[in-house]
Image (cartoon, grey):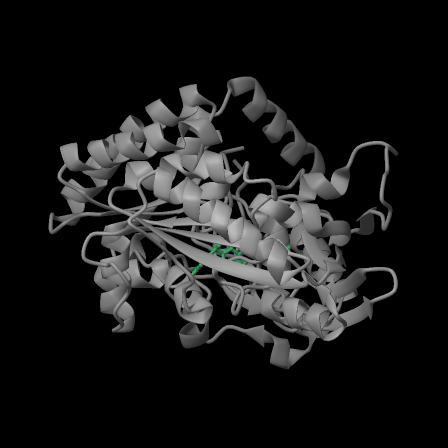
């Protein structure tokens, strides 16, 4: 275990020399904003000693070199919208935020790509692509606030992965500062590439432990001509979820198949102060399709209506798209509004096990008298179950949650599932990662970390213990 050193006045002076005085923050009030991400439980808050706001890749590299020299941990941070405490400085030291590296460098509409700095908001990436008549399909629910660099670091998913894949499928190449402070470019703007290890793919999803991403070259695709949203309402979650595998075979790959259980609908109604259709007892599937013509989408809509009705849907509607997506994207906030203390799981299972897994998880939570709310990127097997304590003390809650976790993951892993489909492991899920990951796989991950970061400078305390 590395013994880190404190940030001294001398180190602060060197940081100021690198990024300028205005870009070095030590005021306690301001540091507090960087002591947590979107996990609202104060058990997971850790104060950094200093926050730095570099404006160039060269500054990032110099900060990392200084940190290696002085043995000070560096926690990279985007917008702090993570939900697994990945950007929380559990060993103190320096938080390095990309907030001031927020330029869209280039949109090349002829060659379908975009170059951006890591601190550009994902929503701005989407808008810039659209302004050029193109489409960036990465679409996490936090798109209005998270940064593209954070998306790459967590391999964010979101609503359109059924058709377009996760963030790693949108990336050509990365500019990265290595854990020892070198600047390099990984990957290339090529359609195919078998030239050695795909190191850009290793850095994608590494949650700031293997490099600081400073620039990204993203793939763009043509804007879909027509988009159709359908809302299928089911009387129980089993019939909704058992429709998912069938919907993936309607002839065209859906863009999204999202599930919201009835308790989530009620939670969102309360949070947004709105009324949702069939919220008394309905469970939702939101299905989005893209097509070249409206007529083609009409044919698909009929097929989906028939399929869902045959599977028990009580209604298949064309919803107000803006309203339904606002509701879907408010799930995390709605549950936090109910209870600051809760735990959000990010389980992913092979699609055929989705109905069984969901049923079993609800049973496990019931058995432990915990409250469960389920929302799911169902089309890609990703289940977000929010577990709420339901009024018990915090000591009892920790102990009960540990039992619930073990019961759930003892089911998920033998089915070929994993702990995280898109949120990452961070600090919050580290113990579970160690417990459930194959020991050989874990040893390979540790070897990579040790080889690339011999001083354990970059985001220590995350993913696993080294
Ligand atoms: C309301 C809400 C909805 C959400 N919906 C989704 C969703 O649909 N899909 C999804 O996948 N996630 C979702 N999330 C989680 C979160 O938004 C994503 O994980 C997002 O990718 C984090 O981006 P960020 O810029 O906020 O990163 P941060 O939270 O700041 O950091 C996340 C991790 O990435 C690392 N990191 C950040 N920037 C860099 C960089 N430049 N270089 C190296 N490492 C870096 C950090 O060290 C940390 O480990 C949601 C969160 C909220 C609050």
Q: Is residue 173 above or below residue 403?
A: below
Q: Residue at x 34, y 23 (%)?
A: 410
Q: Is residue 373 above or below residue 145?
A: above
Q: Is residue 259 left or right of residue 190?
A: left
| Total marks in image | 0
> Which residue occupies the foreground of this view, 455 or 56?
56
In the image, what residue occupies the spot 62% across and 81% down?
A: 22
| Left or right: 174 as drawn, with respect to 359 | right
Q: Position of residue 139 (x, y in %)?
A: 56, 58
Query: Where in the figure is residue 201, as x and y percent of width and height?
Result: 71, 40
Residue 355 falls in image quadrant: top left
Q: Position of residue 363 (x, y in %)?
A: 21, 32
| Residue 296 at x, y percent in the picture | 62, 54
Residue 457 in sight: no
Residue 147 found in image quarter: bottom right
Who's the residue at 53% across and 43% down the image? Answer: 3
In front here: 235 or 61? Answer: 235
When the figure is inspected, residue 400 is found, relative to residue 291, above or below; the finding is: above
Q: Nearer the viewer, residue 201 or 307?
A: 307
> In this image, 162 relative to 318: left or right?
right
Tell which of 230 and 403 is nearer to you. Answer: 230
Q: Quadrant of residue 430?
A: top left
Residue 438 visible somewhere in the drawing: yes
Quadrant housing the C terminus: top right
Taking the image as shown, residue 138 lies to the left or right of residue 93, namely right
């Amino acid at each position: 275990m590395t013994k880190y050193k404190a940030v001294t006045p001398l180190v602060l002076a060197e940081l100021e020399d690198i990024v300028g005085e205005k870009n070095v923050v030590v005021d306690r009030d301001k540091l507090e904003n960087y002591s947590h991400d979107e996990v609202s439980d104060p058990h997971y808050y850790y104060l950094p000693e200093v926050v730095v706001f570099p404006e160039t890749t060269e500054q990032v590299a110099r900060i990392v070199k200084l940190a290696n020299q002085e043995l000070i941990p560096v926690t990279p941070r985007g917008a702090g919208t993570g939900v697994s405490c990945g950007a929380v400085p559990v060993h103190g030291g320096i938080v390095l935020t990309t907030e001031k590296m927020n330029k869209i460098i280039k949109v090349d509409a002829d060659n379908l790509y975009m170059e951006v700095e890591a601190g550009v908001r994902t929503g701005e990436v989407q808008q810039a692509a659209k302004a050029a008549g193109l489409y960036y399909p990465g679409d996490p629910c936090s798109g209005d606030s998270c940064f593209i660099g954070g998306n790459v670091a967590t391999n964010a998913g979101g609503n359109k992965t059924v058709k377009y894949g996760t963030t790693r499928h949108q990336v050509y190449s990365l500019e990265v500062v290595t854990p020892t402070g070198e600047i390099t470019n990984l990957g290339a703007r090529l359609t195919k590439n078998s030239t050695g290890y795909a190191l850009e793919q290793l850095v994608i999803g590494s949650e700031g432990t293997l490099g600081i991403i400073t620039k990204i070259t993203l793939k763009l695709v043509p804007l879909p001509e027509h988009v159709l949203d359908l809302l299928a309402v089911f009387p129980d979650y089993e019939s909704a979820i058992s429709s998912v595998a069938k919907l993936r075979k309607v002839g065209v790959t859906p863009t999204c198949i999202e599930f919201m259980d009835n308790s989530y609908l009620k939670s969102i109604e309360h949070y947004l102060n709105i009324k949702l259709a069939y919220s008394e007892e309905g469970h939702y599937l939101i299905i989005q399709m893209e097509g070249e013509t409206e007529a083609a989408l009409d044919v698909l809509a009929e097929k989906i209506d028939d399929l869902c009705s045959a599977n028990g849907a009580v209604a298949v509607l064309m919803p107000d798209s803006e309203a339904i997506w606002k509701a879907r994207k408010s799930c995390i906030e709605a549950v936090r509004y109910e209870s600051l203390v809760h735990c959000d799981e990010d389980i992913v299972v092979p699609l055929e096990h989705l109905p069984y897994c969901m049923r079993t998880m609800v049973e496990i939570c019931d058995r432990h008298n915990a409250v469960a709310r389920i929302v799911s990127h169902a089309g890609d097997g990703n289940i977000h179950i929010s577990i709420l304590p339901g009024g018990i003390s915090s000591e009892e809650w920790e102990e009960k949650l540990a039992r619930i976790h073990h019961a759930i993951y003892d089911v998920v892993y033998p089915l070929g599932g994993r702990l995280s489909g898109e949120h990452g492991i961070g600090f919050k899920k580290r113990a579970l990662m160690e417990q459930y990951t194959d020991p050989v796989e874990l040893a390979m991950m540790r070897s990579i970390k040790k080889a690339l970061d011999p001083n354990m400078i970059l985001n220590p305390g995350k993913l696993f213990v080294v």
